[in-house]
């Protein structure tokens, strides 16, 4: 039995390696850095036709179970794809739509709504986003909706309130909205074109966008309900934690890209008659970047393994906040130090380092920055409950 | 589980055949039942007189040399079992004996020593009759060890040794020293060094303890003045000492990066913060959590290298990053402990807060050498820059 599972592990590892290689080959060819550069500041900030290519590769349905017409792969496999695309700074909302939103939907069960949404995601027709965050800024650790409420009226249920930091910020087909209902959490599917939905795009540092979405008395039908009460909390929290880990995968890929670029520069840039990488002051700074990168990598390996196993929800939340904290801080450190070690060239828009730096800024802030996640970790350790 | 006390030099139990978890539990039970309670988590390095009883307990059990082959009286543990053994020692707060014989010269003689040297020295290490110390550093050869100047001149069947070693840990408890000396001044500095053994009863050797800033005498100076060391005490070939000393840095390097020291310091900070009522202070909680995660992430990095060893792979130069992060995390925790005790941050010995005793300075003192010994943090960064990042000087 032991050797059998070892064998399966080896087979799975081989498959994962092959997937990682093909994802890298695809990403390098189909998404050179010039593509990422060209899409900055465009209407949606990404390319919907490229999304179709991801669907052709089967990656829009990679995580989705076979019962929903997906490929039923794990987070280890998803990480291979996410990492390859992040290395190329591809602007498509892979983690927001295919991890965060998709997983909320899947975690809420297998009703008609879930089936229909997931099937559309698999074929690449639907790009959903999660609208959950109500704080515009600050370090509040509050995942539960409070301002956005649903209230029964004579003609049905109405949704009212505003959500921030919704990604993707444009060209998104609908929202999973967290709302307060009878003092509990509820999750609703709201198409982007529903009456009363107002999307205001906010430009982000990397040339993509997020949005603030207002729901002005949006009428809801019970067929739009994904989950309520504890089931909603469990489904949302799990997807949120999974998205934290997968965002950390992106951040690690960016760290690696920035460190590689910086090392190459240190080895080749000559001043005072020798490569600047021969100076000990710079060497030691580069080593500190390596250490942060490798800490991220070591923790991330454990986090992905945890996601792919049956585990205690609190343990998952602790691990997710822990890796997001490390990956975010390390990402920003790598970004700042890479600029410094390059000198002025690192601060120019023409130089590709900036693409990584700007994406690192966006991903460090998204879903909560390092400080916020350390506070969540501390709260979870004290409360030791699955509450978000 | 037996607790028989008969000497078993030629061990026969195949420990590696045991399931690792079963092995771990067996070791744990033995430590819990037999290790002296008053010696758990010692604040300083234990002296031979204090730890000799435990050393002999292990010796009688046949467990004093877990990494040595069984043919030489060891347990013959695989890396995986040895890691479990060490982790259980750390878990129970088992103090280190003066163990240079077990961890350094024993394995080195097994690999490079002559049959005569092995027969003469190994059994006496197992039996606790010979206590060894390591003579590498000199006043002018620290990080740049290869520039060492202790002189060994051939004279008939002997070498005549003149020079000085320093930072020699627990030399005052040792009966023997293994050391590096210069045997050829005409070649590249690494190529003129030999590896020698000396008995401390040899005329001309003087040991002088050095008091450290914590007030303890954990290391010494060792002076050689026209000391006659027989040529039979040369290990490996003449001028081969540098290679031999470096080759010894095997997977045991991983233990320099063990998270246990930081985990223990974190528990001290936590206990002090509880007593001081600091967990209601967001400023403190933020810093505490950051360090808590630094320790947790250190464990993840440690596990990654442990897995590498368990797979039978050799450790690369990248393991240096583990030592840097472990020592510097420990240091940050020690600093925090001093900081949160405020005005009492300079009190020697325990302070008492709300009925709880807090030892403020032991961690602070222990953290200072942690970033120096075994290759300072700066030397480790040099290694990482050159050998991992390919940044050449």
Image: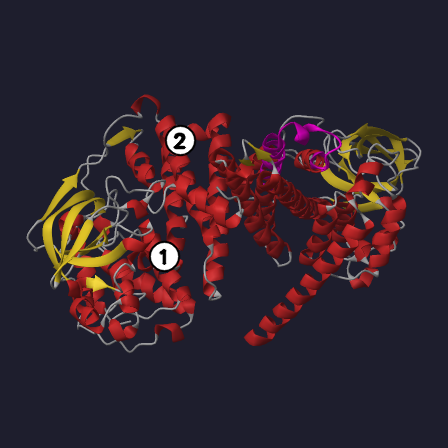
**Disc 2 packing (10 Å; few <14; some 14–19; many ≥20):** many
The answer to whether one can see residue A312 in this image is: no
List x then y, in percent, for residue B183: 23, 54
Look at 70% across and 38% down and name the residue there. A356
Q: How many marks?
A: 2
In the current view of this chain or complex, which residue is farthest to the bottom?
Answer: B12
User: Disc 1 marks which residue?
Assistant: B249
Query: In the picture provided, is B369 more to the left or to the right than B218?
Result: right
Circle 2: element type:
helix
In the current view of this chain or complex, which residue is farthest to the top?
Answer: B343
- In the image, residue A38 above or below residue A309: above
Query: In the picture provided, is A210 more to the left or to the right than B366?
Result: right
Circle 1: element type:
loop
Which one is in front, A218 or B127?
B127
The answer to whether one can see residue B187 in this image is: yes
User: Disc 2 marks which residue?
Assistant: B336
Looking at marks 2 and 1 on the same chain, the residue that comes earlier in the sequence is marked by 1
Residue B32 is one of the magenta-drawn residues: no
Which one is in front, B155 or B83?
B155
Residue A333 is one of the magenta-drawn residues: yes
List x then y, in percent, for residue A39: 84, 37
Image quadrant assignment for residue B21? bottom left
Identify the magenta region.
A327-355
Q: How is the image coloured?
A: secondary structure
Quarter of the image that includes the C terminus of chain A: top right
In the current view of this chain or complex, which residue is farthest to the left?
Answer: B203
Quarter of the image that includes the N terminus of chain A: bottom right
Q: CA distance from mark 2 to mark 1?
A: 32 Å
- In the image, residue B359 above or below residue A56: above
């Amino acid at each position: 039995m032991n050797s059998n599972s070892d064998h399966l592990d080896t087979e799975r590892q081989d498959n994962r390696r092959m997937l990682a290689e093909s994802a890298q080959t695809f990403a390098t060819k189909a998404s050179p850095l010039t593509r990422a550069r060209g899409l900055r500041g465009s209407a949606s900030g990404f390319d919907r036709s490229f999304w179709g290519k991801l669907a052709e590769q089967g990656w829009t349905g990679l995580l989705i179970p076979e019962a929903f017409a997906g490929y039923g792969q794990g987070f280890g496999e998803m990480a291979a794809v996410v990492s390859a695309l992040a290395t190329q700074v591809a602007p498509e909302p892979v983690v927001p739509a295919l991890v965060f939103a998709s997983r909320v939907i899947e975690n809420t069960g297998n009703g008609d709504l879930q089936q229909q949404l997931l099937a559309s995601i698999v074929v690449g027709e639907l790009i959903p986003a999660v609208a959950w965050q109500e704080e515009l800024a600050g370090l509040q650790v509050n995942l539960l909706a409070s301002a956005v409420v649903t209230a029964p009226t004579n003609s049905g249920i109405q949704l009212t309130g505003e959500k921030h930091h919704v990604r993707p910020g444009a060209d998104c087909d609908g929202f999973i909205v967290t709302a307060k209902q009878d003092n509990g959490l509820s999750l609703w599917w709201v198409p982007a074109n529903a009456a009363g939905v107002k999307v205001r795009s906010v430009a982000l540092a990397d040339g993509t966008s997020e949005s603030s979405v207002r729901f002005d008395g949006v009428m809801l039908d019970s067929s739009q309900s994904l989950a309520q009460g504890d089931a909603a909390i469990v489904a949302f929290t799990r997807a949120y934690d999974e998205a934290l880990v997968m965002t950390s995968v992106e951040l690690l890929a960016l760290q690696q890209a920035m460190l590689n670029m910086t090392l190459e520069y240190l080895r080749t840039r000559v001043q005072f008659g020798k490569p600047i990488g021969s100076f000990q002051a710079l060497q030691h700074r580069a080593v500190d970047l390596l250490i942060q990168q490798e800490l991220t990598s070591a923790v991330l390996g454990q986090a992905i393994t945890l996601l792919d196993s049956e585990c205690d929800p609190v343990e998952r939340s602790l691990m997710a906040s822990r890796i997001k904290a490390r990956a975010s801080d390390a990402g920003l450190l790598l970004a700042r130090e890479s600029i410094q070690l390059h000198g002025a060239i690192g601060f120019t828009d023409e130089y590709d380092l900036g693409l990584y730096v700007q994406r690192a800024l966006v991903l460090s802030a998204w879903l909560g920055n390092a400080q916020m996640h350390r506070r969540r970790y501390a709260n979870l350790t004290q409360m030791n409950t699955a509450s978000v | 589980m037996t607790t028989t006390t008969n000497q078993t030099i030629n061990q026969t139990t195949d420990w590696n055949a045991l399931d690792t978890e079963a092995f771990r539990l067996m070791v744990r039970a033995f430590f819990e039942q037999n290790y002296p309670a008053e010696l758990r988590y010692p604040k300083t390095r234990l002296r031979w007189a204090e730890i000799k009883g435990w050393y002999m307990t292990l010796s009688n059990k046949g467990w004093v040399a877990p990494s040595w082959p069984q043919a030489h009286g060891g347990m013959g543990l695989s890396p995986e079992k040895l890691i479990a053994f060490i982790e259980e020692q750390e878990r129970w707060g088992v103090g280190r004996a003066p163990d240079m014989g077990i961890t350094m010269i024993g394995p080195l003689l097994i690999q490079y020593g002559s049959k005569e040297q092995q027969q003469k020295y190994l059994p006496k290490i197992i039996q606790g009759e010979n206590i060894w110390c390591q003579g590498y550093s000199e006043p002018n050869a620290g990080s740049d060890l290869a520039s060492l100047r202790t002189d060994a001149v051939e004279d008939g069947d002997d070498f005549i040794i003149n020079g000085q070693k320093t930072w020699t840990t627990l030399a005052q408890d040792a009966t023997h020293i293994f050391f590096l000396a210069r045997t050829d001044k005409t070649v590249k500095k690494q190529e003129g060094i030999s590896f020698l053994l000396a008995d401390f009863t040899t005329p001309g050797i003087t040991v002088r303890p050095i008091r450290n800033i914590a007030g303890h005498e954990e290391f010494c100076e060792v002076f050689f003045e026209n000391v006659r060391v027989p040529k039979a005490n040369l290990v490996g070939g003449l001028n081969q000492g540098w290679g031999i000393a470096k080759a010894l840095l095997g997977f045991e390097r991983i233990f320099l990066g063990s998270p246990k020291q930081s985990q223990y310091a974190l528990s001290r900070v936590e206990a002090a913060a509880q007593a001081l009522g600091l967990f209601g202070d967001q400023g403190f909680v933020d810093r505490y959590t950051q360090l808590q995660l630094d320790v947790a992430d250190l464990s993840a990095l440690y596990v990654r290298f442990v897995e590498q060893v368990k797979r039978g792979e050799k450790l690369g130069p990248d393991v240096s990053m583990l030592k840097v992060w472990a020592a510097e995390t420990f240091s940050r925790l020690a600093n925090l402990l001093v900081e949160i005790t405020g005005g009492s941050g300079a009190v020697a010995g325990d302070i008492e807060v709300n009925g709880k005793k807090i030892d403020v300075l032991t961690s602070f003192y222990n953290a200072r050498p942690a970033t120096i010994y075994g290759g300072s943090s700066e030397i480790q960064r040099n290694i990482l820059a050159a050998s991992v990042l390919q940044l050449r000087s």
